[in-house]
Image (tube, rainbow, N blue to C red):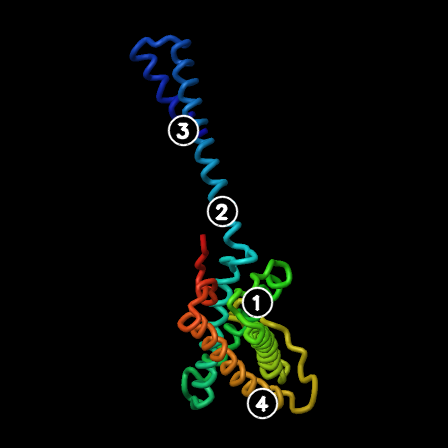
Amino acid sequence: MTYLIVEIVKGIPYTILHNVTNKELLGVIWKQLIAVRVIYFCALLFYDGYIEEVEQKMKNTQHHYGYMTIVIHWLVAGIVFGLFGLGFWMVDLGYYDPWYKNGPDLHKGIGFILFVLMIVRVASRVLQTQPASIETHNKFEQKAGHIVHSLLYFLLFLIMVSGYLISTADGRGIDIFGLFTLPSFGALFNNQEDIAGVIHEYAAYVVIAAALLHCAGAIKHHVIDKDNTLKRMLGHRQK
C-alpha cells in the first residue's frame, strides 16, 4: 500500500510535465496496482508456505524429533554439565573470593532457567507425538533407554527441588538475576538445609553418571550400530 501511494504521488508531477490525461494516469495506476497485488500475493504464498514448513519441523513426528525438542534437549544437556562444573568449583571458594557470592547466585539463576526448560520439556512429551524406537533397537535397549530417561527426569527435578530447599531454608527468597525473587516457604522440616544439601550433591553425581551413560549409548548406536539414534537428535531427517 505504501508503495502504491508513493507511485501515485510520483505520477502527479509526471502528468503535469508530460500532459498525461487523467484517464491515462488511472490506467498507469491500475497497472501498477495489479503488479503490486501480484507481487504481494506471490510473497504471501511463499511466506505462508515457509511458516507452515517451519511449524511442521518444530513438532515431533513418528520418525523425527521436532526442532523445539532438539533445542531443549541440547540446552538442558549443556546447562546440566555447566551447573555441575560450577557447583563442583564453587564449594572450595574462600569467603573473600568475589565468586563466593556471585557463584551461588549464578548457579541459582541458571537452575531456575533449567527448571522452566524441564517444565516445557515434560509438557512437550505429554502433548506431542514421540518418535517410535528405531527398528534396530532390541527390547533390552528400548527398556534401558526408557529407564535412563525416566531416571534423568526424576533426578533433575529432585536436584532442583532440593536446591530450592537449600537456598530458602533461612526464609529468604531466591533472587533471579535481579529481575524477580522466588518466594521462600521457610524451613519446612528440621535440618532442611543439611538434608537437602546431601540430596542435592549425591543426586548431581548420579545424574551426571546417568547422562554419561546416555551419551555412551548414543555414541554406540552411531559408531557401532550405525543407526539414526544420534542423527535424529541432531536434526537429521531422512527423505
For the residues labelled 3 and 2, the Cα–Cα distance comes to 29 Å
Query: For the residue carrying disc 4, how many other residues have a C-alpha within 10 Å: few (<14), some (14-19), or many (20+)?
Result: few
Q: Amino acid at mark 3?
A: Tyr
Question: How far across and down, in percent of the image, does residue 80 sit?
Answer: 49, 75
Of labels 4 and 2, earlier in sequence is 2
Of labels 3 and 4, earlier in sequence is 3
Q: Nearer the viewer, mark 1 or mark 3?
A: 1
Q: Nearer the viewer, mark 3 or mark 4?
A: 4
Q: Nearer the viewer, mark 2 or mark 1?
A: 2
Q: Secondary structure at mark 1?
A: helix
Q: Amino acid at mark 2?
A: Glu
Please tell me which residue lies in front, 160 or 53: 53
Residue 98 seen in render: yes
For the residues labelled 4 and 1, the Cα–Cα distance comes to 24 Å
Q: Nearer the viewer, mark 4 or mark 2?
A: 2
Residue 173 seen in render: no
Of labels 1 and 3, earlier in sequence is 3
Q: Which residue position is annotated with label 3?
A: 3
Question: How far across and down, in percent of the image, does residue 202 sit?
Answer: 55, 87
Q: Which residue position is annotated with label 2?
A: 53
Q: Which residue position is annotated with label 1?
A: 116
Q: Secondary structure at mark 4?
A: helix
Residue at the outermost right position: 189
For the residues labelled 2 and 1, the Cα–Cα distance comes to 27 Å
Q: Secondary structure at mark 3?
A: helix
